Image (tube, helix red, strand yellow):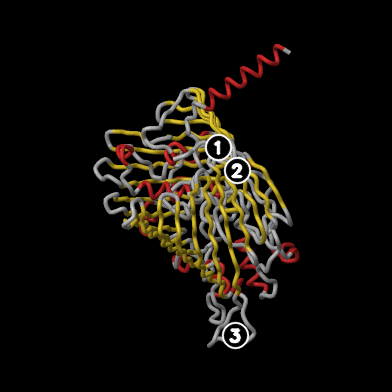
């Protein structure tokens, strides 16, 4: 009895000790609703005593940075805190729509995302446990039809068989609990290393990325990274090197089983090994400028060897000619590796409260450097965007204007490089490794294979509060459209036109975010009306609703 009393007393003392030594060093995942956007705005504003702090490419999403004033910030060697509780509710009434959301399916019907956890520090060791729970209804919907000619069906499965993006991520109601934003790492100076399942977002994009974003469920990986910009005589550097594991969806592409039996190539049950590196540089001579480079490789584990280059292919040569044997690359191609590389920039000017950024990527190895320079359009994708804040009369109030263009469609280069007019492979797709995905969702952009988008938003913002409108245009699966219908004047592309209302509100320790959109899909799934003709083409349209509500309870994090 006395022993139990003493144990309880020590537990109370220990918990009290933890409570008064909050470090607030835990981080929200990049792409987290409300926080990502708020952190990005803060990068454009001179922030009092924090103005001398060197900022990274992406916003600092730690609780310490977002909610504590500079005078209150502290970093204890032994600390513990409870993570804010996050909930996201999503509803699509007629068809899947939306991107992001980490492990959310963005399918038809209702979905629920919940995340909470704890963070602790013991000297140089940092432990973050933040699991995620997702429930999804996965209702069936009007997908790609079976009433097309056989060649069109083959063209559709040409891309489905080079990717892992099924129409449904599960059959009926499904739920999954995952480690989410958890990690165990050690920090030494400005470096950090350890094991993690936390979301990675590389590149400067606001809504999308060409490599890693918050679109798919996070994946387990070993990491070696900087946790703050590292100062050198040339400027500041940031970087990350990861070794990861990716999984397939284990789902057939179409909702129509007969089509799957005729045209679908079953997915390999093997997991995929991932090796990736990201380096960004801030020149000391040009304040506000960021330049960066990303390279990724993935390969089925059964194909992986045991040499250094099998574990770290990111250090391989960029020129494919270096891998030729007997005048060809058959042996190299048999390793079934999928690589992509991107270059990016970002420039922000705090005086003008303005930023502009861009990212250019290429997937296929260039034969030589000459080939890369003379043919930059081959297997490329690009992203470009900006953000501008206009100060209003009320203190800390701004008019926020931002936009982003994403282009993944194959260029006209396909007409020269390949036989015929069909093209070959879309961005983030691969004939051997079946796409740059995890559990059926793209690791980078979530708008769809070979799709393009233009997004524009204008809003009134004050701290976390926001009221605005968003318009978006998505040209769906353009590579398939031009492969299957490019020479058919009666067929029109499938375009989504979206208009939405955005509203965020902070009240004490509660944060509420909402996004309600009407989606007008013209020529949905490339279906034509019976009255269509070559001179007057007419497709079938669909009007649908997409809604999201985010709710966050900030435990012990009052600004």
Q: Residue at label 2?
A: 115
The C terminus sits in image quarter = top left
Q: Is residue 265 left or right of residue 339?
A: right
Graded by Cα atoms within 10 Å as few (under 14), some (14 to 19) or many (20 or more), the crowding at tag 2 reads many
Q: Is residue 481 left or right of residue 41?
A: right
Residue drawn where x is 66% and y is 75% of the image: 148
Q: Are marks 1 and 2 in contact (CB under 8 Å)?
A: yes
Q: Tell me if residue 33 comes above or below residue 405 in the rendering.
A: above
In this view of the protein, which residue sits in the foreground, 349 or 279? Answer: 349
Q: Quadrant of residue 173?
A: bottom right
Note whether residue 364 is visible: no
Mark 2 and mark 3: Cα distance apart in space = 49 Å
Q: Position of residue 493 (x, y in %)?
A: 54, 73
Q: Where residue 48 sits: x, y (%)? A: 31, 40
Residue 382 to residue 114: above or below: below
Name the residue carrying label 3. 532
* Residue lying farthest to the left in this orientation: 285
Going from N to C along the chain, the mark reached first, 2 or 3, is 2
Helix, strand or loop at disc 3? Answer: loop
**SS at circle 1:** loop
Residue at numbered disc 1: 83
Whether pointer 3 and pointer 1 mark residues with C-beta atoms closer than 8 Å, the reply is: no
Q: Classify mark 2: helix, strand or loop.
A: strand
Nearest the eye: 489 or 229 = 229
């Amino acid at each position: 009895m006395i022993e139990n009393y003493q144990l309880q007393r020590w537990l109370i003392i220990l918990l009290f000790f933890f409570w008064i030594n909050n470090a607030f060093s835990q981080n929200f995942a990049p792409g987290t609703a409300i926080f990502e956007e708020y952190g990005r705005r803060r990068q454009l504003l001179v922030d009092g005593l924090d103005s001398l702090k060197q900022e990274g490419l992406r916003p600092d999403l730690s609780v310490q940075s977002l909610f504590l004033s500079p005078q209150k910030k502290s970093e204890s060697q032994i600390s513990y805190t409870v993570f804010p509780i996050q909930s996201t509710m999503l509803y699509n009434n007629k068809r899947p729509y939306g991107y992001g959301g980490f492990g959310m399916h963005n399918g038809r019907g209702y979905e629920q995302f919940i995340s909470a956890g704890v963070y602790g520090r013991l000297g140089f060791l940092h432990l973050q446990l933040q699991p995620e729970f997702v429930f999804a209804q996965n209702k069936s919907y009007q997908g790609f039809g079976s009433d097309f000619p056989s060649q069109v069906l083959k063209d559709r499965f040409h891309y489905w068989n080079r990717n892992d993006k099924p129409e449904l991520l599960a059959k009926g109601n499904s739920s999954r609990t995952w480690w989410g934003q958890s990690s165990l790492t050690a920090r030494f100076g400005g470096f950090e290393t350890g094991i993690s399942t936390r979301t990675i977002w590389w590149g400067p994009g606001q809504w999308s990325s060409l490599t890693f974003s918050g679109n798919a469920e996070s994946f387990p990986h070993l990491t070696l990274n900087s946790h703050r910009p590292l100062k050198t005589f040339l400027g500041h550097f940031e970087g990350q090197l990861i070794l990861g594991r990716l999984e397939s969806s284990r789902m057939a592409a179409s909702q129509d089983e007969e089509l799957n039996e005729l045209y679908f190539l079953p997915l390999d049950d093997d997991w995929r090994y991932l090796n990736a590196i990201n380096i960004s540089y801030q020149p000391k001579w040009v304040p506000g400028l960021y330049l960066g480079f990303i390279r990724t490789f993935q390969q089925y584990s059964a194909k992986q060897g045991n040499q250094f280059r099998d574990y770290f292919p990111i250090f391989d040569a960029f020129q494919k000619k270096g891998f030729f044997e007997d005048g060809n690359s058959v042996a190299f191609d048999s390793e079934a590796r999928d690589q992509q590389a991107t270059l990016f920039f970002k420039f922000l000017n705090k005086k003008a409260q303005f930023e502009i950024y861009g990212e250019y990527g290429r997937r296929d190895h260039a034969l030589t450097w000459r080939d890369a320079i003379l043919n930059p359009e081959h297997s490329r994708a690009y992203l470009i965007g900006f953000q501008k804040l206009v100060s209003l009369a009320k203190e800390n109030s701004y008019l926020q204007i931002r936009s982003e263009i994403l282009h993944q469609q194959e260029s006209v280069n396909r007409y020269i490089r390949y036989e015929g007019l069909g093209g070959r492979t879309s961005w983030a797709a691969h004939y051997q490794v079946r796409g740059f995905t995890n559990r059926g969702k793209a690791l980078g952009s979530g708008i769809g294979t070979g799709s393009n988008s233009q997004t524009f938003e204008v809003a009134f913002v004050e701290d976390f509060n926001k009221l605005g409108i968003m318009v978006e245009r998505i040209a769906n699966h353009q590579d398939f459209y031009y492969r299957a219908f490019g020479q058919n004047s009666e067929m029109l592309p499938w375009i989504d036109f979206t208009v939405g209302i955005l509203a965020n509100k902070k009240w004490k320790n509660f944060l509420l975010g909402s996004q309600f959109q009407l989606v007008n899909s013209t020529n949905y799934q490339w279906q034509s009306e019976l009255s269509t003709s070559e001179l007057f083409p007419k497709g079938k349209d669909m009007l649908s609703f997409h809604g999201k509500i985010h709710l966050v309870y900030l435990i012990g994090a009052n600004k």
